[in-house]
Amino acid sequence: MTEQSSSPRVAVVTGAARGIGAATALRLAADGYAVAVVDLTEEAGKETVERIAAAGGRALAVGADVSDAGQVQAAVDRIAAELGAPVVLVNNAGVLRDNLLFKMSESDWDTVMNVHLKGAFLMSKACQKHMVDAGFGRIVNLSSSSAQGNRGQANYSAAKAGLQGFTKTLAIELGKFGITANAVAPGFIATEMTAATAARIGMEFEAFKAAAATQIPVNRVGTPEDIANTISFLAGEGAGFVSGQVIYVAGGPLD
Ligand code: NAP
């Protein structure tokens, strides 16, 4: 376990039961962090925790809806008590409620805003106190290439663009406390989220991925590990002069 002062460093990853969040939790555990695996239920996070333990790491499954202020505060209090004060936060929890604007319901809009934007706000607010006390912190928010606009995703693209402004503001406010904030904006990553999109438009996932790959300069779709690798860099001590950035991890140029 990597040590900061006398205590192990603690990282929190939301939406870490599967996909990008699970890969990130595994990677940060391999990097030496004790990892809080936050997902909607404690049960959902157990598999990730077991995979981390099997690889020799330390993790704790914590159930919380990141869009609920009371559940977020209780989760962060529990993490601080059982693992230690969190100094790395990855705001990864996410949902899709895709639809063309004229069919998008108010509930589709609110759900996406609440999980992505309000969730990142609540988690960051609850964790920053521990980071300020430690004089060190790393916040990484999951944006998306969809922040640049994507048909059927008025809610999601607005939330992911919003997260970029949120990230830059955190970088400005928290920098003097040794805390950086950055956003990682993935392109097409093969997860249950993109599998669900394929199902929604009536395509086989393999064909959907193959079609996407033809539009990507490196000629393949991304993996959760592609994103975890970038988050690992941003979470590390060596990235202390990188703050307020949006890093597109999309197999080609986006800005
Ligand atoms: P995923 O496979 O759908 O995993 C998301 C996880 O977040 C799930 O375990 C989900 O739980 C959890 N979650 C949803 N709402 C939550 C809430 N309110 N509180 C706590 N946890 C919650 O998604 P992914 O593809 O790994 O994506 C991870 C992040 O990357 C998301 O922010 C996504 O928008 C972003 N991203 C993904 C891609 C891509 O191509 N996959 C591209 C760009 C950006 P349930 O299973 O119970 O819903």
Image (cartoon, grey):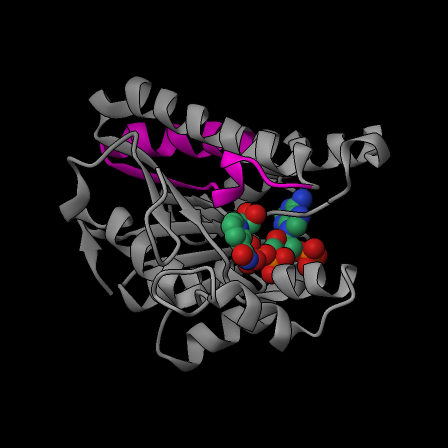
Left or right, 176 with respect to 123, comes to: left
Left or right, 62 with respect to 36, comes to: right
Left or right, 145 with respect to 70, comes to: left
Q: Residue placed at 46% from the left, 53% from the top? A: 187
First to last magenta residue range? 122-151
The quarter of the picture where residue 159 lies is: top right
Q: Quadrant of the N terminus?
A: bottom left
Q: Image height check: is 240 above or below 218?
A: above
Q: Quadrant of the C terminus?
A: top left
Residue 62 visible in the current orientation: no
Q: Image height check: is 26 above or below 75?
A: below
The quarter of the picture where residue 25 lies is: bottom left
Find residue 115 and report its horizontal and vertical position in percent. 64, 38
Residue 127 visible in the current orientation: yes
Q: Residue placed at 67% from the left, 47% from the top? A: 95
Q: Image height check: is 190 above or below 160?
A: below
Residue 131 among those drawn in magenta: yes
Left or right, 200 with respect to 124, comes to: right
Find residue 154 and report its horizontal and vertical position in percent. 67, 33
Q: Residue furthest bottom?
A: 54
Q: Which residue lies furthest to the front in this view?
A: 214
Find residue 190 and report its horizontal and vertical position in percent. 54, 67
Q: Image height check: is 178 above or below 176?
A: below
Q: Residue placed at 66% from the left, 41% from the top? A: 151
Residue 229 among those drawn in magenta: no
Q: Which of 221 and 40 is in front in this view?
A: 221
Q: Nearer the viewer, residue 154 or 191?
A: 154
Find residue 8 and report its horizontal and vertical position in percent. 27, 55
